[in-house]
Image (cartoon, grey):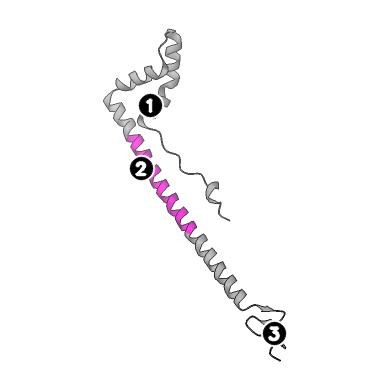
């Protein structure tokens, strides 16, 4: 059958434009910092490079991040709609099962006869 709600992974939020840039050049920056032997923090160096990045390259990274975010939003909306439909389906099944149990118990026949009938000999 279909996996339970918590077994299905949620869509993963995409990286920002800065994160795309960082992932693209992190090895280069680490090598650069270790070759210099400076006490410059990796995050500080990345921030400086991002601030000084060519506007066209930054715009391309921002466009890619926007595309990934739109894709993520679409996947998330689809997942939430599927989950809502499953919850409604499960609720309808529970209501149907409850109705069946009530109807079955109402018409159940016990050892004394049908429910609602007086036991044999009770009126004699």
Image position of 52 with respect to 82: above or below: above
Q: Nearer the viewer, mark 3 or mark 1?
A: 3
Specify the label residue 119 is tagged with: 3
Specify the farthest residue to the bottom.
124
Say what secondary structure mark 1 lies in: helix
Disc 3 crowd rating (10 Å Cα; few below 14, some 14-19, many 20+) is few
- Residue at 43%, 54% in the rendered image: 81
Q: Is residue 65 magenta?
A: yes
Nearest the viewer among 67 and 121 is 121
Disc 2 crowd rating (10 Å Cα; few below 14, some 14-19, many 20+) is few
Q: Is residue 119 magenta?
A: no
Specify the label residue 21 is tagged with: 1
What range of the chain is rendered magenta?
A: 63-87
- Residue at 62%, 82% in the rendered image: 116
Distance between the Cα atoms at labels 2 and 3? Answer: 70 Å
Distance between the Cα atoms at labels 1 and 2? Answer: 19 Å
Circle 2 residue? 70
């Amino acid at each position: 059958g279909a996996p339970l709600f918590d077994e299905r992974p949620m869509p993963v939020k995409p990286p920002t434009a800065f994160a795309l840039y960082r992932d693209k050049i992190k090895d280069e920056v680490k090598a650069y910092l270790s070759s210099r032997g400076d006490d410059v923090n990796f995050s500080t160096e990345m921030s400086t490079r991002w601030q000084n990045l060519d506007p066209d390259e930054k715009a391309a990274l921002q466009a890619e991040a926007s595309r990934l975010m739109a894709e993520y939003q679409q996947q998330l909306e689809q997942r939430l709609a599927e989950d809502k439909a499953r919850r409604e389906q499960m609720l309808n099944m529970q209501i149907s099962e409850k109705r069946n149990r009530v109807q079955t118990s109402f018409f159940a026949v016990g050892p004394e006869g049908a429910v609602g009938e007086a036991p044999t000999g009770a009126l004699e």
